[in-house]
Image (tube, coloured by chain):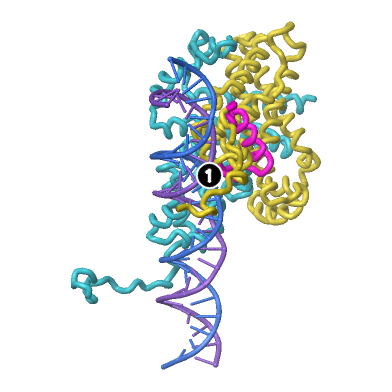
Chain colours: A yellow, B cyan, C purple, D blue
Amino acid sequence: MARSEDIPSLWTRPQRPRRREQPALSREQIVTEALAILDGDGIEALSMRKLGARLNAGATSMYTHVANKDELLALAVDQVFGELPLPDTDAGPAPADWREAVTGCAEGVRAVILRHPWIVSVLGDVGLVYFGPSWMRLSETFLALLESAGFELVEANEAMGAILGYTIGAASVEAAWLSALARRGRDEQEWLDQLLPSVIEATKGHPRLHRLYTGQAQPEVARGRDDGFASGVRLVLDGVEAAHRARRSG
Amino acid sequence: MARSEDIPSLWTRPQRPRRREQPALSREQIVTEALAILDGDGIEALSMRKLGARLNAGATSMYTHVANKDELLALAVDQVFGELPLPDTDAGPAPADWREAVTGCAEGVRAVILRHPWIVSVLGDVGLVYFGPSWMRLSETFLALLESAGFELVEANEAMGAILGYTIGAASVEAAWLSALARRGRDEQEWLDQLLPSVIEATKGHPRLHRLYTGQAQPEVARGRDDGFASGVRLVLDGVEAAHRARRSG
DNA sequence: CACTGTTCGCAACGCCGTACAGTGTGCGGT
DNA sequence: ACCGCACACTGTACGGCGTTGCGAACAGTG
């Protein structure tokens, strides 16, 4: 015979959960909450259990909406790139200055990566993001901008590769640096001050790096990272433009 | 009671291992074996237990030579970049064609990343590699090459940022793609054939991507990835050179 | 009522990184 | 000849992880 403790009282027992009014969980909800964890506490803080807990659900319930963690991460990456504001290339004529527009897009991509530095840690696992809707939208915009500037499609594709390649690489390096700082809970300037002496010590035998880090080649090294990226994009666009002109006249 | 087969005879048993002659394990050994695992079976196959087993040692013995797994990975990354052959910039005069030399270095970096695609997965966790000896050697070489081509140090640093940024980004994208393939055990062409239809389907509403993928904009899209990278580097160097000339004459 | 299909979560499996206490060993000092 | 320390190394254990199997709870349909 069951003792009274074995079965919680009829009255204190929680109301039978009225489930299935509509599914309690949705893929969208899950991805959104995952993003909150990723942005708030970084990649190593995201676990299926924690994610489930945040949604008042069991960890394994995620798997009815998402195949596995990798797929979840891919969805998260696509979502953040979906937030990227892009110029409307359908309406209106060609933009007055295509360089400005392209630069704006590249800076947008960099901003997304810096705002969500965990992206760098999953770049290697989600090779298929480039076929996701957000990334396709981005690519199409780039191609449209370049075509409107007079590039043939194949040429535009090549240029896009250079621009996005640089953007991803440069932003990844920055993001890695920033999240290394964040993991150690240091401020950027503070950490630099603290690390610089040993770095300088390590540049014995590397005279150029030594000059660079000791600041003898200032003032522009200390220029902000924003300016550094901007001038990098400018260099790449110079190359793109030069090749384009050479092709038209050749 | 133990039977005679259970314990090899006292006399035939190998001499008791004379430990402490020198440590059985070394950091170098550990990193080398870790690299073997990484290159052979990918990043998710590397665990401290497996690594220990490969070295006939307990998992936790690694920790006397390496602070933690992250440090181990950082050492591994530095080691593979150490294998990169670099031109000797100390001896002899300036290279006849600095573009060729710089291009060679960039292609070397790409080759390292493609040969060890797990690097991409740890890029985000090892922000400090850029202060490791191998990367410093690489940077110093780049700066030397550019200086010998007439660049001021700060200008050279800027150019290096653009070139390495592009190289890292482009190679990372490639490596992510390749290791996604490897994880699924597919051949590249086979996978492309299999995936292309659905990708094309997904490019409704993206006319330029559609043209690109359906091959109406061939022939050069199907050009190998090697050529694609080479032309990207060429674009970046065009930009670098143009900016340099503008600065000299301006 | 029975039947079907879906959502959800408990329990469990086999991993993982690593903290910690303990074991044997060689070396320097006495 | 002895002691004690420093050190490389190990077994065990802790708390976590991603994922699966399975059954319970439910909605919709007949």
In reply to whether residue B231 is colored magenta, the answer given is: no
Decide: is D3 above or below A195.
below
The x, y position of residue D17, in whole percent, is 53, 46
| Residue drawn at 38 percent across, 27 percent down | B187
Is residue A197 found left or right of B81 in the rendered image?
Answer: right
| Residue drawn at 77 percent across, 48 percent down | A189
The residue closer to the viewer here, A221 or B11, is B11
The C terminus of chain A, quarter of image: top right
| Residue drawn at 58 percent across, 20 percent down | A133
Decide: is A49 above or below B62.
above
Q: Which chain does the residue under circle 1 lie in?
A: B
The residue closer to the viewer here, B98 or B22, is B22
Query: What is the magenta range?
Result: A21-49
The residue closer to the viewer here, B172 or A208, is B172
Q: Quadrant of residue B20?
A: bottom left
In reply to whether residue A40 is colored magenta, the answer given is: yes
Is residue B66 found left or right of A93 in the rendered image?
Answer: left
Determine which residue is flagged by label 1: B81
Is residue B160 found left or right of B198 in the rendered image?
Answer: right
The x, y position of residue B98, in whole percent, is 60, 32
The x, y position of residue B248, in whole percent, is 76, 28
Circle 1 crowding by C-alpha within 10 Å: few under 14, some 14–19, many from 20:
many
Is residue B188 found left or right of A20 in the rendered image?
Answer: left
**What secondary structure do most residues of the magenta stretch adopt?**
helix
Q: Amino acid at mark 1?
A: Phe
The x, y position of residue C17, in whole percent, is 52, 53
Decide: is B207 above or below B93.
above
Instruction: Indicate the secondary structure of the residue bearing disc 1.
Output: helix
Q: Is residue A126 visible in the rendered structure shown here? A: no
The residue closer to the viewer here, B123 or B141, is B123
Q: Quadrant of residue B49?
A: bottom left
Decide: is A147 above or below A133.
above
